[in-house]
Structures are given as C-alpha cells and as structure tokens.
Amino acid sequence: MAKIQIITIITNVFFVLYISRLIVKGKLREEYAIVWVICTVFLMLFSFWRNGLEVLARLTGVYQAPNLVFTGFIFAILIYLLHLSVVASKLHNDNKKLAQNIALLKEQFDKHLNDQKI
Amino acid sequence: MPDRVLIVIPCYNEETSLPLVLNELRQIKLPGSYQMKVLVINDCSKDNTAAIAKEHHATVIDLPVNLGIGGAVQTGILFARDNGFDLAIQLDGDGQHPPKELAKLIAFHEETRANVVIGSRFLENEGYQSSFTRRLGIKYFLWFNRLLTGLQIYDSTSGFRLFDKAAIEIAALNYPDEYPEPESLVSFSKAGLKIMEVPVIMSHRLGGKSSIRHFGSLYYCIKVTLAMLFSFIRKS
C-alpha cells in the first residue's frame, strides 16, 4: 500500500468520526449528513482501489483521471449548493410564518391582558 | 351590519411621518356605514415607531424579526382575515398616501365591486409623480404586466391598495416578501380577481428612505421580472 493511500484512509476515518460526532451531538441533521457520508464512501473506495480512477476514466473517455475527479466533484458541489439554497428558502418561509404568528398572538395576548385589567 | 375596514400601515423606522398620518386618519370620516380600524405593523423598527403608534391609539403588531414590506403587509392581511374584516387597505407609513384619498378607493370599490383597487398616480398625472428613471421602470412594468395578465395597470408599483374579502383570502395564503406590488398582481389576476385602478393624489414621503435606491433599482427590476414570470408559470 502506498503512502498516499494510508494518509487518505486515515483522513477519511477521522472525517467519518467527525460527522458521526456531529450527528450524535445533534449538530447535524441526518438528511444533510447523507451527502457527506456518500462522499466518504467514495473517498474510501478510491483510497483502497488505486487503479479505480484510471478504470473509470477509461470507461467514460476522460484522458486524464484527475480531470474526472475535478469534474465529478465540482458537479456534486454545485448540486449540493443548490440544495442548500433550497433549504435556506424553506427556512426563510418558515421563519416568516413563525414571526407573523408570534406577532399576531402577542397582539391578542396583550389585548386580553388589557381587557382583564379593566 | 356595518362594513369593517382595516387600515394596514406597514412601518419600518417611520417615527417622523407616522404621527401625521395617524392624526389625519383619525380626522377623516369614511362614507356610509364603514367602520375603520387602524393597524400599524411595526417591522422591527429601530426607532420609536411602535410607541408612537400606541400613543396615537392605533393597534400595533410588533414583528419580532424584520420581514420586509411584503411580510409586514401580509401580517396585516392575516389579521384582517382572522378578525373577519370586509376590506383591508394598505397605506404606507411614510406619508406618501394621504389618508383623505381612502374614501376614493372605497367609493370605487362600491361602484365597481373590484376585488383589488389600486390607488394610481398616473391616471390623471396629479401630485407626486416620482423620478424619471422610476417612471421608466413603472412603464416597463405596465408593458410586462400587460404581456402576462392582459391587464392595463398604470401604477403597478403603488402600495396604496384596497383588498376585499376574496383578495384577503388569497393574499393571506400567498404574498411575496420583497417588492410585492407588481408580482402580487400576477397572482391576483391568475386567481380570477378583478383588479382596477382609481386616480389618487400622492405626496412626497415625509420621512424615512425608499427601500429602492441606486443599484437597488436594477436589482429591483430583475428580481420583480423573475418573480412575475414565475408567479405566472406557477400553478395557482
């Protein structure tokens, strides 16, 4: 096993441990963790199977294997960013509804309190 | 039963102009059997807007976070829906919409039974007319709105608007957050509401700053164009 393989495998193990820790502590929701877990699976796969990249590059007609890595990862990152924008939009909407409801309820509550005072 | 009208005043840092608007509102009398309630939506202002509104005996709704004009107006619409108001009228807190013009909107609604009545600056070209670039933008929206909805709305960016019960129901469910005026017209017209304009005389803002300035106007045009387009495509 080459040195680089050992380094990537160890890094990967730490990465998986860190993700698990975040999930366990409730800092990362499972649905957002899926993509990271899949990433580590890929990294792990190609750490062990060193020729894998060459094989895939040949299969897809890419001349140089590293280009395949860049293309694949950039695409994955773009998709994930889009996903995050969707999440942010949903949060924005939920936040708006919550704020409106709180404000309306507070008005009702204050009115109720005032009525009772009289 | 008298018809109940809710005056929705969305406010963000309007302490200088709000007292004038509220005083004027108290002095006007609406035609017929209309009963008016004034609701100030304080969109998380940094100044004394809320306290001033309370001093002037308005009902105040304090938003805990800043939602922008659309979110604030929608809060007022939700209040109107939940409390069974017959009409809701949006009136800006900066003094651009003189309260005495309210009667025109109501009378026009009575006459035409339109679901949405827009107070328009441009039908008779009186009073405050806005700057050149802004009028250019408004012309563009006239054209774009006509393309999408077939409606001839001259002042589609006017926030001086009357909503009847049907319009309140729709706006309570779906009202854009940012720059809602032109976009909401698309969704109203898709819902089959009758939208009409009545000439009003507007004045310069008495205080505060417009939310649309400098490079903001380009962003405004692009954002609103996109929003109108997607509102048009979206299934209602």
Image (cartoon, rainbow, N blue to C red):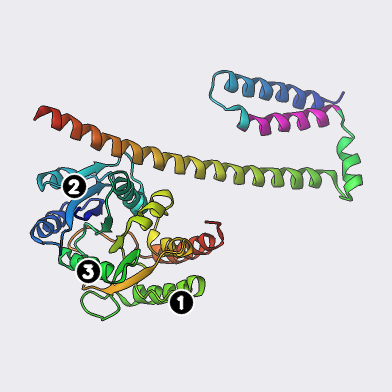
Assign the N terminus of chain A to one quadrant of the image: top right
* Side of B235 where B113 appears, left or right: left
Q: In this view of the protein, can residue B177 be seen by the observer? A: no
| Quadrant housing residue B135 | bottom left
| Residue plotted at (31% across, 43% down) | B82
Q: In this view of the protein, can residue B112 be seen by the observer? A: yes
Q: Which chain is home to disc 3?
A: B
| Residue plotted at (10% across, 62% down) | B28
| Residue plotted at (35% across, 62% down) | B212
**Circle nearer the N terminus (1, 2):** 2
Discs 1 and 2 carry the same chain letter: yes
Q: Which mark is residue B143?
A: 1
In front of the other: label 1 or label 2? 1
Assign the C terminus of chain A to one quadrant of the image: top left
Q: Which residues are magenta?
A: A32-48
Q: Which chain is home to disc 1?
A: B
Query: Would you say the residues marked 3 and 2 are in contact, meaning their CB atoms lie under 8 Å apart?
Result: no
Q: Which mark is residue B107?
A: 3
The secondary element bearing badge 1 is classed as: helix
In-front residue for pair B193/A78: B193
**Residue B80 x %, y %:** 29, 49
The residue that mark 2 highlights is B49
In-front residue for pair A118/B213: A118
Residue A117 in the image: above or below residue B11? above
Q: Quick one: label 2, few (<14), some, or many (20+) residues within 10 Å? A: many
**Residue A66 x %, y %:** 80, 43
In front of the other: label 3 or label 2? 3
